[in-house]
Image (tube, rainbow, N blue to C red):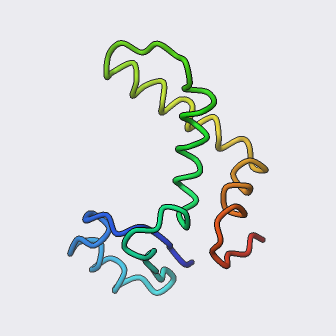
C-alpha cells in the first residue's frame, strides 16, 4: 500500500515513522510542502463546504463538528464522487 499525505506534523511524528519503518506493506510519500491542488482531500473539503454544509446555520462547535462528520461519512457511500476528487488531482494516481 502506498500512503500519500500532506506534511502535517502528526504525519512526521516519531511514532508514525517508527510504525512505517516496521511495516513491510506500507510505503509513504509526501505531497510537496504547499500543494493543495495536488491533495484530493482538499477537493473533498471544497465539496463539503460548497454543498451539504453551505447555507446551514450552525451556532455551536459541537453541532458543527457533528454535522461535518455526518456529511463526511455520507461520502463513503458515493464511490463515483470520491473517485472524481482523485481524478481531478494532477497526480499520476491510478484507481483500480
Count up the numbered dots. Answer: 0
Q: Which x, y percent locates residue 53?
A: 55, 26
Q: Nearer the viewer, residue 17 or 50?
A: 50
Residue at image point 50% right, 73% down? 3
Q: Nearer the viewer, residue 62 or 35?
A: 35
Residue at image point 74% right, 55% down? 84
Question: Residue lying farthest left?
Answer: 14
Residue at image point 43% right, 25% down? 66
Residue at image point 45% right, 74% down? 31
From the viewer's perspective, tell me whether residue 62 is left or right of residue 3. Answer: left
Q: Where is 72 relative to 34, above or below? A: above
Q: Which x, y percent locates residue 12?
A: 28, 73
Q: Where is 63 relative to 13, above or below? A: above
From the viewer's perspective, tell me whether residue 71 is left or right of residue 60. Answer: right
Q: Nearer the viewer, residue 50 or 22?
A: 50
Q: Which x, y percent locates residue 62?
A: 33, 21
Task: Assign the N terminus to one quadrant of the image.
Answer: bottom right
Q: Which x, y percent locates residue 28?
A: 45, 79
Task: Assign the C terminus to one quadrant of the image.
Answer: bottom right
Tell me the quarter of the picture where residue 65 sits: top left
Tell me the quarter of the picture where residue 54 sits: top right
Amino acid at each position: 500500500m502506498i500512503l500519500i499525505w500532506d506534511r502535517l506534523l502528526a504525519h512526521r511524528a516519531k511514532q508514525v515513522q517508527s510504525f512505517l519503518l516496521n511495516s513491510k506493506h506500507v510505503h509513504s510519500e509526501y505531497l510537496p510542502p504547499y500543494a493543495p491542488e495536488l491533495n484530493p482531500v482538499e477537493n473533498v473539503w471544497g465539496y463539503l463546504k460548497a454543498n451539504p454544509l453551505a447555507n446551514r446555520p450552525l451556532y455551536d462547535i459541537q453541532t458543527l463538528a457533528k454535522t461535518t462528520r455526518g456529511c463526511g461519512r455520507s461520502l463513503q457511500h458515493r464511490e463515483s464522487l470520491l473517485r472524481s476528487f482523485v481524478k481531478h488531482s494532477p497526480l499520476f494516481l491510478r484507481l483500480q
